[in-house]
Image: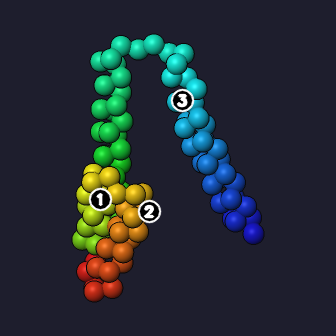
Amino acid sequence: MTGNLVLIGSVGVLAAGTFAFRFAGPVLRPRIATRPWVERTMATAAVVLLTALVGTTALTEGHDLAGVARPTGVVVAGLLAWRKAPFVVVVLSAAATTAGLRLLGVP
């Protein structure tokens, strides 16, 4: 019971933090003046950090390398996102790809 409360509380904190970041951007944007090169650098840094995060979580499981199924699902999701597919399609396609490969016995 206590573990469930901790999980619910941590999910709530994560949701509140995510909302705060998403809310702060549009609110602060008109109030802060930056040079164009700073904006480009920040956008590039965000893409690099997100790519590193996705790569790390897709390719590793604990301290070992992940199998083939998960990285393949991530590649499918990346290609669909690049083609500007709807978010639901991206997530469901990645999950279906990974699950299908694992169903076929691919690690």
Please tell me whether mark 1 sits on a helix, a strand or a loop. helix
Q: What's the distance in space between the residues labelled 3 and 1, CA to CA? A: 27 Å
Of the two numbered discs 3 and 1 on the same chain, state the one appearing first in sequence: 3
* Quadrant in which residue 60 is drawn: bottom left
Q: Which residue is mark 1?
A: 80
Q: Dot 2 surroundings within 10 Å: few (below 14), some, or many (20 or more)?
A: few
Q: How is the image coloured?
A: rainbow
Side of 104 where 89 appears, left or right: right
Task: Name above or below for residue 26 compared with residue 61.
Answer: above
Confirm whether residue 65 shows in the render: no
The spot of residue 11 in percent (x, y) is 63, 54
- Residue 62 x %, y %: 38, 63
Q: Residue furthest right?
A: 1
The reply to whether discs 2 and 1 touch (Cβ–Cβ < 8 Å) is: no
Q: Residue at x 45, y 13 (%)?
A: 33
Q: Which residue is mark 2?
A: 88
- Amino acid type for the residue under numbered disc 2: Val
As drawn, which residue projects farthest toward the bottom?
Answer: 104
Q: Which labelled disc corresponds to residue 26? A: 3
Q: Secondary structure at mark 2?
A: helix
Q: Amino acid at mark 3?
A: Pro
